[in-house]
Structure formats: C-alpha cells, structure tokens
Image (tube, grey):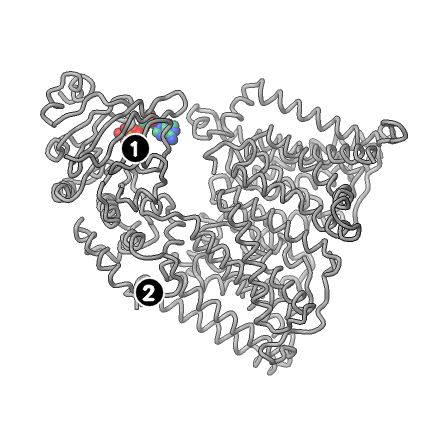
Amino acid sequence: MSRFAPQIAPRLKAALAILVLMALVPVAAHAIGDPFLSVIANRMLVFAIAALSLDLILGYGAMVSFGHAAYLGFGAYAVALGARWGVTDLLAQILLGMVFSAAFALVTGAISLRTRGVYFIMITLAFAQMAYFFFVSQGSLGGDDGVALQGRSTLLGLSLDGDVTLYYVTLGALALVYAGLYRLTGSRFGRVLKGTRENSLRMQAMGYRPFPYQLVAYVIAGCLCSVAGVLLANLTEYVSPAYMGWHRSGEMIVMLVFGGIGTLTGAMAGALVAVGLEEVLAAFSEHWRLGFGLALVLVVLFSPEGLTGLAKRLGIGGKHG
Amino acid sequence: MAELLEIRDLRKNFGALAVTDGVSLSVGEGELHAIIGPNGAGKTTLIAQLSGQLAPDGGQVLYGGEDITHLDMAARVRRGLARSFQITALLPGMTVLENVALAVQARSGSSFRFWRDAGGEEITNAQARAALEEVGLADRAAVLASALSHGEQRQLELAVALATKPRLLLLDEPLAGTGGQEAERLIALMQRLKSRLTIVLIEHDMDAVFQLADRISVLVYGAIAATGTPEAVRADPAVRAAYLGEDA
Amino acid sequence: MFNLFLLQLLNGAQFGILLFLVAAGLTLVFGIMDFINLAHGVLYMVGAYLMATFAGMTGNYWLGLMLALPATLIFGLVLEFLVFRRLYDRSHLDQVLATFGLILMLSEGVRILWGSAPLNVEMPELLSGSVPLAGPLKYPVYRIAVIAAGLASAVGLWALINHTRAGMLLRAGASNRPMVAALGVDISRLFMLVFAGGAMLAGFAGAIVAPILSVDPGMGESILILTFVVIVIGGVGSIRGAFLAAILVGVVDTVGRTFGPIWLRMVMDPSAAAQTGRMLAPMLVYLLMAAVLFYSPTGLFGRRGAK
Ligand SMILES: Nc1ncnc2c1ncn2[C@@H]1O[C@H](COP(=O)(O)OP(=O)(O)OP(=O)(O)O)[C@@H](O)[C@H]1O
Ligand SMILES: [Mg+2]
C-alpha cells in the first residue's frame, strides 16, 4: 500500500465509526420506541450518498456544479418509470437511473465543461432547470405534483417495505459508494482530477488534456447521485420534480461544504449533520430558512476563508486528500 | 547538426503591441540555445507559443521536421517537448513526489484507471524519485509542494519537466530567485543535461548563459537582434548597445 | 392565426424587455467583478413588493412607483455595503454559498412580512384599457407601456455606456479588469455604481410588472434562472448581448408555448403534437442556450478568452 497510508488511516477509521454508529440507529429507535427517528436517519444516509457524489466533482474536481439535484430526480423517476414498466428490482432501477444520468451528464457536461467560472455555475443550473421542467410537463407522471408510488422496490426478491430493511440497504449503498470513491480518489484517475483542480495549466504542461477526465468524473458523479435518488423515492414512496429543484442543488453544496470539501469523510459527515439539523430546525420553526440563510451569510462573511476555512480550522475539513 | 526546432517568421500581437515580431530561429539537436533580452522583450511569450500555451498570430513552428504550430500542449509534450514556467506552476496541495509522479504517469499507461492505488505504483514512483534525485530534491519527496522554499520549487519545476522524458526542454529563467548554492547545483545539472537533451534556455544570469550556451540569440522588442556563438554575441556592437550596454 | 402570432410576439417582446432589465445589471456585475450573484432576482422581487406596498398605501400607482424605486435602490445599496462588497475577492464557491443564503433569508423574510399569498397592484387609470391593433385585434395599453419603458431604459443605458466617462470605464472593465485598475480608477466606487444601477433596473422591472403578474415570494427565483440563460447566451459582460438574448429568450419562450404544438401538428398527429409541444415548450430556451454554447462557449457577444 501507499507509504502515505498512515496519514489516511485516521480518516478511514472515522468513516467506519460513522457507519457503525449509523448502523445502531434503528436499534436505538426501537429501544426508545420512536420509529420516526429511523426515517430521519435514513434521509440523512440518502443525502450523504448525494453529497459524496457531489464531492467528486466539486471537491476533487473544483467544478462548482449548481445542478446536481437533477440526478437525484433522475434516480427518483427511474423508480416511478421502472415500476410502470414492471421493473421493480432496486438494482435494475438503479441501472435505469444511471443510464438516464449518464446520458444527461454526458451531453450537458460536454457543453458545460467547455466553460469556466461563472459560466459553468450558471449553465449547470440552467440545464438542471431544464430537466426539472421536463418532468413538470410530464402529465402522466403527475406533472408538478408528482406521483405516489404503488409500493417500494424489491432487492433480488427481498421486499423493502420494512423501514428497517430499507434503512440497512441504504446504509450498505452508502458504504459501497464511500469505498468506491475512496479507491477512485486514490487512483491514477483521481490524481489527475486533483492535479487539474490544483493547476490545470501545469497538468497540460505534463501532457494531460483535462477535459475527458473532468467529463468522466462529471458522469460518474451524476450516476452515483442517482443512486441516492432511487433510495429517496423508496423512502418517501413519492416522486416529484421538487426533488430536482435548484434549492436542492444549493442545499447539497451547503451540506458538502459543511463537513469540509474535498474529503470523503467530511462530505459524508457534513451531509449527515446538515440533514439532521434541518429536521430539528424545521420542527422548531416554519421560518427556519431565515435563520439558516442568515447563518450561511454570516459564516461565509466572517470566517476568513469562508465556510471551507471555518471547517478547516475546526479540524473537520483538513487538507485535501 | 540536424535541426530539431525551427521557428519561421513567428508573430504575436497583444493589442497594438507586437510581442513576437517575425522571429525566425533554428535550434540543432543537442544544442543549448540561450535566449536573452531585456525585461518585456517577449521571451516568455515566445516560449508560450513554442509549448502550445499561446496560439501565434502568424508563422510556423517545426519540431523534428513536423509542423506543430496548431498542436495543443499535451500533444507537444507527448512528442518530447517540455517546459518549465518562469512563474512557478506546481500542484501546491500535492506532495513533491506526487507532482513528479503525475508527470511520469502522463507518459506511461492510461490514466483512466479508477481502482488501484496510484501511490503504490512502484515503477512510477521509482522514475519520479530518479528525477528528484537528479535535481537534488530526493530528501523532500514526502513534503507538500507548497511547503518548499522558493529555490526548491524551482528545482521541482525542473524535475517535473525532466520526468516527462523530453527531447527538447524549454526553460524559462530556471535560476530566477535561487540562492548561490542552489544556482550552482542547477547550473551543474544543466551542464549534465546538455549532453542528453536539446535545451532552449531563457536566463538573465549572464555568467550562467555564457558558461552554458552553445549559441545565443538576443531578443529585443520581440525581434531577434543577433544570433551566434557566445563570443560573437559578446562582440556584436548592436547587442552591446541594446542590451549588454546596461552592464558595461 | 397571424393575429395570434402578432399578439404572442408582443407578449414575448414585453417579457424579453423585463428579462433585459434584470439581466443588464447582473451581466455587468459578472463581467466586471467576476462575482456570481444568485441574489439579484431578490431585487426584482423586492421591487415588486415595495411597489405593492407603496401603491396600496398611497392608493396611487405613480406615487407608489416613485417611492418604490428609491426604496429598492437603498435596499440594494445596503446589501452591497453589508454583504456583496466583502465577497468580491472570494472564491466563486463562497459567493454561491453566501448569495444562496441571502435568497433563503430574504424570501423567507418576504413571506413573514407579506405572507405567501400573491398580492395585486391596481393598474393606473391612464394605462388601463386596450388599443386596437391590426383589425379586430386589441392590445393592453399597459403592456405597451411596459415595452416602451423598457426600451427607454435600454436606450438610456446605451447612451450612458457609450457616451459617458463612467460608461467607458465600464466597457473597459467588463473586458479587461486589471487594465481599469491600472488606470488608477477607484474600482470599489465603480462597482458600487454598477451595483446600484443594476439594483435599480431590477427593482424597476419588478415594480412595473406588478400589475400584470401576481406578486409572490417565488417570483425572484423563477426570473433569476431565465436571466442566467439570457446572460449566458448574450455573453457575460455584454449589454448588447443581454438585450438581444433577452428579446430572443422572451419571444422564443412565449411564442414556443403557444405555437409549438400548432407547428408540430403539421408534422405529427394532433394528440402527439400537443403532448410533444407541452413537453418541449418549457425546455425551448434551455435548448437554445445549449445550441448557442455549442457554437460559442462564451455566448454571442462574450469576449474570447473569458473562459
Ligand atoms: N496576456 C498578455 N496580454 C497583454 N500583454 C501581455 C500579455 N502577456 C505579456 N504581455 C506583454 O508582452 C510583453 C512581453 O512579455 P513577456 O512576458 O513575454 O516578456 P519577457 O521577455 O519574458 O520579460 P521578463 O524578462 O520580464 O520575463 C510585455 O510588455 C508584457 O507586458
Ligand atoms: Mg519572461
């Protein structure tokens, strides 16, 4: 293994600890007799997958995409469409969601990645909005209101109707996505991606063309996010265009930055905490967005390096890697 | 001597300013060709066009007989044309070894590998260490590039360029900002490289230039004012007036 | 049929003009300050709400407008002073986060102050009613007034940018920021001016659209994304590009929604045409954007190398 392994190990351990802790939640929920706790925790897991996928392009690739929620939608609609076409197996639906996502990411990514900076942010946002309107106009899928699912998917014949079953399937998916991205970010491909983030000109002077690497990362991130979408649809048994609204894209960036960008463990932890916090705040006041927005503004303004800097100073973020 | 690099009537304007004004130049295989000239003469701009970073407005660049004027940077690097940057351009958040290993990786096998740990590639790391050894940076391999001193960063620039296994090396002021001992080591290194590679060297340190160069071209206001052996250039009255005159 | 087309064309132009008013300031902010401001749509919304409030309070459209405009301007300046000015030299990611936070905060604030229900603004006596337009066709005076007001603003802006010293600096700044700084111009004052102007135009758009659109908390966000499309198509930093792109987007969006299904019927059977039309219409402007970007990554009038 790498000679830098001793540096990486603590973070891996932290990730493992988080996963084990999350695995205990249904047990705890059962013990205190509050099944709703599991549902909230399940939501946290789903968004942890989404945040991890976003971290690949935003954290490791420095591509500030403001349209990542579109892929959440593709995953969710893959469940609705799959069920309609008689495909109820979770894996098949995930595959379907990935096909949608890959196609969309390939085309829109190829166009967006020819641009930089403010253009890239605006264009990813606009394309996601296009996908949003596409599903709004699908009357047969409930249009604006969305559509309730007949029931949950099955996994190789196993029914996911039980909340606990779905919970552990989601947890398994999160662990797999984490492990996959852990390998990927340490691989040759991951290095090229990080190198391009650090200094694209230098990478070109070494003989790389950044575009294909960034595009592939963009497609992979979209596909992984659609897994979160598939699981989200199963959790809520409901699919609507609201999953892919641009607020959701913004919230996903906030979650990611919350835990420290460019580190997988940070992304996962950030999403878990942020979703949990959102639930608490929402229960506290219907106007929670006022305080949430204000806090966001204040932190960016008064933490010298922005939210990223704050996370770093608190030791949650750490250096890239 | 066979020509490795041939520049024909190269032109580049920034607005009304002709920064490269009809430059023609040829560099033989194995030659160390120094380009000197006052600040703002257009030396870096010339290198940028040779390496493919900037597209010229007119003229041609031939490399090994092939017209590479319209190739991008990556394609030129693959043909053996490497450069160092005047303003250090490294990957600050990665270690010294990773910086060089990425350059090795670029020319050895596909980078579309998603699973195996790149840090564990012994062959790649060995080659990267060899390049670090060559510039005298081997003991700093595990340090972040951003933690290097300025002089060390210059050394790393060179190591990265060498790791691409170039045939032609374009060096933009490699000695700038290095101290006495570092500079001496780098000069000795270039002396050694001379026997293996063709080098185009931009440098303000005249002692180093006259010590290393086989031929020297003087660039003034984007045009070549004189080309020749160090002795010939030193004696050229136009050069003395335009450039060396400052020192004399 | 032709009459309907003309009607939709006018509606499209009127929508385009509004888009332009919002986009004009924003494209300069992007171009000159390289600052991604997601909260610009908020000014449009605030303009509309202040208009609704002041017009309701005074019972007079014109008084309302006269009060709403400076109020929006002050609101914009306060935002600039408190928030934006600290963000100019931050990373794009920080800018996205902070301005996203502002949107959440201000939209919620509006909800608390004015409620979620849409508000209405009475049309002024002078501009209500319709005028005949080609045969039996009539067109609302108010919409014509909106087009005229927008065009007048565009012309004023054009004159300002092409014939004043501040305008010259703006043009120079939008295409080459370091140069303007090198000229010794007080950049932060220039920024503030641009910002104030942009806020005013967006607020103006919100105020004049209030009588024909319902004023609701989501209005700033829906126009913001279309504004982005306009800026991307026109090219960041280009007022001329923003104008042409805004009209294009306004017309394509409006006409496409009505005529898409009609035109499609010529090539497919009616039910399929209706369905495809419904699906394609809202996506049309985004497809247009994709096509333009495919042809030129920096839009129609963006500077090259501005990547
Ligand atoms: N991108 C650019 N846009 C406009 N002008 C430029 C640009 N790059 C360089 N210049 C100008 O072109 C001229 C030549 O610059 P260049 O960097 O090539 O000079 P140089 O010979 O390398 O100088 P030095 O010895 O200081 O490194 C300078 O006047 C510089 O200001
Ligand atoms: Mg130079």
Give the structural element (helix, strand or loop) at label 2.
helix
- Nearer the observer: mark 2 or 1; the answer is 1
C61 left or right, relative to A195: right
**Quadrant containing ligand 1:** top left
From mark 2 to mark 1, how far is it between C-alphas? 47 Å
Q: Is residue A51 above or below residue B13?
A: below
Disc 2 designates what residue?
A7
**Residue A298 seen in the figure:** no
Q: Residue at x 51, y 62 (%)?
A: A270
Q: Nearer the viewer, residue A187 or A12?
A: A187
Question: Which mark identifies residue A16?
Answer: none
Disc 1 designates what residue?
B61
Coordinates of residue C185 in the picture (x, y in percent)? 47, 25
Give amino acid for label 1: Val
A143 left or right, relative to C190: right
Give amino acid for label 2: Gln
Give the structural element (helix, strand or loop) at label 1.
strand
Identify the subunit bearing mark 2. A
The reply to the same-chain question for discs 2 and 1 is no
Q: What count of labels does the image hold?
A: 2
Coordinates of residue A288 in the picture (x, y in percent)? 65, 57
Q: Residue C243 lies in what quarter of the image?
A: top right
**Residue B147 seen in the figure:** yes
Q: Nearer the viewer, residue C266 or C245?
A: C266
Q: Nearer the viewer, residue B8 or C185?
A: B8
Q: Is residue A141 above or below residue C199?
A: below
Coordinates of residue C304 in the picture (x, y in percent)? 48, 33
Coordinates of residue B191 in the picture (x, y in percent)? 12, 41
Residue farthest along the right direction in this orientation = C136
